[in-house]
Amino acid sequence: MSAEVIAAPPQKYRVLVVDDDASLRNVCSMLLLKSGYAVDCAEDGFSALLSMKHSVPDVLLSDLNMPHMSGFELLSVVRRRFPQVAVIAMSGAYEYTEDVPRGVIADAFYPKGHASEIRLPDIVANLLSTAESRAPSHVSESAPVWIPRNGKDASGRPFIVITCTECLRSFPMSVTEEVNASILVTPCVFCANDVRYIIDFSRSVTSPEQTIAAAAGAGVWPAIRAVKARIRLAEEPDKTTRNHIAECNGD
């Protein structure tokens, strides 16, 4: 008597929806759930990266304008750390178009406010069907780093601090003009690796408070403790974030 062969159920593709607007996040999640996708959600870029540490999605759908970590920064990090993930950027700040806006590191674009003209599940399905052909280019070409301005130096010249994606060492560089959403290239002063970057002129890095700077300047250990504290805050989700992730995962 031959054994009956039972076909395995089709595997659900997983989509991570990232948006600080809870109503839009829920609408996108419901559209994808109704189309048969498994859905996780996150309220900002940091929450998204925490979620991806535990479960890497097949598709990432992210808003571009978010607090704490912008969608531009998130997509850059995801392209470098998770090149296998297909990425959809969404925003209401661009005219309706099927093309990805300049400077946005994504495979597709979903314009908010144009839901009647373009279906989100169709975009996801198309990306999944072509993901294998795009993967080599994701791996071979490093994503540009989105970096904010750091203010002005002692001579009054604007500058930025670039961290090399190869040797991970940082170096300052003067900014001669504002070139929005343009990918720039500069050689690392340490290892000569070509660093691709985009300057986010909408944001700037504020200097630490004088008390922190004074403590760090007093010796090595105060500075190390300050850095470790910042790392713990970045890596360990607070209670609100844990509850949010658990709710999205249905736990």
Image: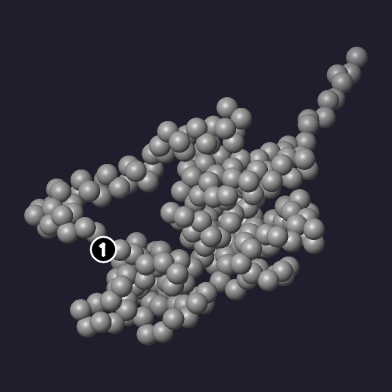
Residue depicted at x 67% and y 59%: 112
Please give left or right for residue 57 compared with residue 160 in the image: right
Find residue 208 and report its image quarter. Answer: bottom left
Find residue 114 and report its image quarter. Answer: bottom right
Q: Amino acid at mark 1?
A: Ser
**70 to 190, vertically: above or below:** above
Label 1 neighbour load within 10 Å: few <14, some 14-19, many 20+:
few
Residue depicted at x 83% and y 25%: 6
Residue depicted at x 53% and y 46%: 43
Residue toward you, 13 or 102: 102
Residue 192 pos. (x, y %): 36, 74
Find residue 178 and report its image quarter. Answer: bottom left
In the picture, the quarter occupied by the N terminus is top right
- Element type where label 1 sits in the image: loop
Is residue 190 visible to us here?
Answer: no
Residue 181 pos. (x, y %): 52, 74
- In the rendered image, the residue lying farthest to the bottom is 176
Residue depicted at x 27% and y 44%: 229
Q: What colour-coding does the image apply?
A: one colour
**19 to 155, vertically: above or below:** above
In the picture, the quarter occupied by the C terminus is top right
Residue of label 1:
207
- In the rendered image, the residue lying farthest to the right is 1
Residue 34 pos. (x, y %): 77, 40
- In the rendered image, the residue lying farthest to the top is 1
Residue toward you, 19 or 145: 19
- In the rendered image, the residue lying farthest to the left is 218
Please give left or right for residue 12 compared with residue 67 in the image: right
